[in-house]
Amino acid sequence: MKRRYIILLAAVVSLAACKKIQNGFQSDFIRYKDNNLYAKRGLILYQSDRINADGSTPPYTYKMLNLRKADGSPAPVEFKTSYDITVFKAGQSFDATTDTTVELLNKKREKISALPMYFNETSGQLTFNKASANLPLGQYVFDVQMTNPTGTKLFKSLATINVVDPTTDDLFVITDDVANGFNDVTGSVTPMRNPIITCTKVNNNGARVILKMVDKNGRTFNPKNGEIIKRGDRPTFENYAKFNPVIKTDTAMICDFEIAPFPLTKYVTPTTDWGFLMYYRIPSTYAKIDNFPTNVGFSVNPRWSWQLKLEGTYVIQVQFPDVTKK
């Protein structure tokens, strides 16, 4: 009897030795921190979180499969289309002290052809660049195939990419915004209502600001014929135009700023750090301020500070809610 038990035990051990030992672990519950991923069109760089492998044995790799619209139809071709974008060369960055012309700036930059989105097969991260400005708005679902030493699994509809436009705060920040009426005779200062400053993106082309000043009825003041002038030695739009001169038209001042953000750097003189402040004056010849005395003229004197964060073409409008153009 004892001999039979020994033989049986030997057989069990032999079978166990022949059975393949599982090499590690692969979870059924990999995930992103938030499976709703947001891509803001046109940002210089946006990266999602990594995929959480949920304790799976490394090394592992991922593949994005079957990118599609939320309704199941194929994703638009823009995801697989390369676009020309301008970037700094590897190891290069902007230096305000030396990069003073477009020619010098361009020595550090190059134009490359890039897809708007890249999927990192090691981490599962999604990276979007400036070319993402070309992606259609919408929701896009994708599957992920994971491979590690235990084998390969397919995770259907692992995440949703939400392609959205940047918010106003992503594009434009206002840090100062006031206006005062100056008496033409005495020079005394009377507060006015704060101007209403808006930023409207026209398109993704170039890097251009079109600055307009309008009265409460939307009538534009003409910078070309002296309806908008400087205020002494204080900084204006032109002081922040590093690479191209400001062009004045009948309705606007236009600056091709080349590189975001704009203004790129603060305006600093030997005695004053002006930050991004800009000062202007609309002479009383061209403007009337609501509820101000009419027996003497008052000029309109706005001051503002703002910064554009992304390249593209924008209209920045400064509207005076208590001013009527004469």
Image: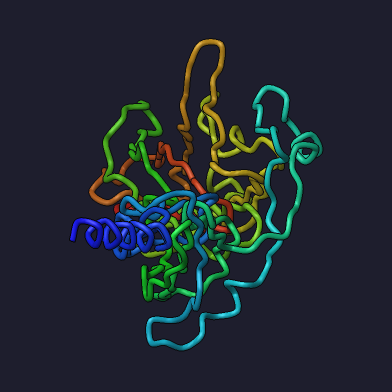
The quarter of the picture where residue 239 lies is top right
Direction top: furthest residue? 271
Total marks shown come to 0
Say which of 88 and 148 sits in front.
148
Q: Is residue 215 visible?
A: no
Say which of 135 and 200 sits in front.
135
Say which of 242 and 95 sits in front.
95
Q: Is residue 210 above or below residue 82?
A: above
Task: Please give left or right for residue 5 compared with residue 160 in the image.
Answer: left
Direction left: furthest residue? 1
Q: Please state the horizontal and vertical placement of residue 71, each as a whole percent of the image.
A: 38, 87
- Residue shown at 53% from the left, 29% from the top: 235
Q: Is residue 262 above or below residue 139?
A: above
The quarter of the picture where residue 12 lies is bottom left
What is the quadrant of the C terminus in the image?
bottom left
- Residue shown at 35% from the left, 40% from the top: 177
Q: Please state the horizontal and vertical placement of residue 162, each as a whole percent of the image.
A: 39, 68
Q: Please state the horizontal and vertical placement of residue 130, each as a whole percent of the image.
A: 58, 56
- Residue shown at 65% from the left, 50% from the top: 248
Q: Is residue 211 above or below residue 62?
A: above
Q: Please state the horizontal and vertical placement of residue 27, each as a whole percent of the image.
A: 32, 60
The quarter of the picture where residue 262 lies is top right
What is the quadrant of the N terminus in the image?
bottom left
What colour scheme has been applied to the protein in the rendered image? rainbow
Q: Is residue 80 visible?
A: yes
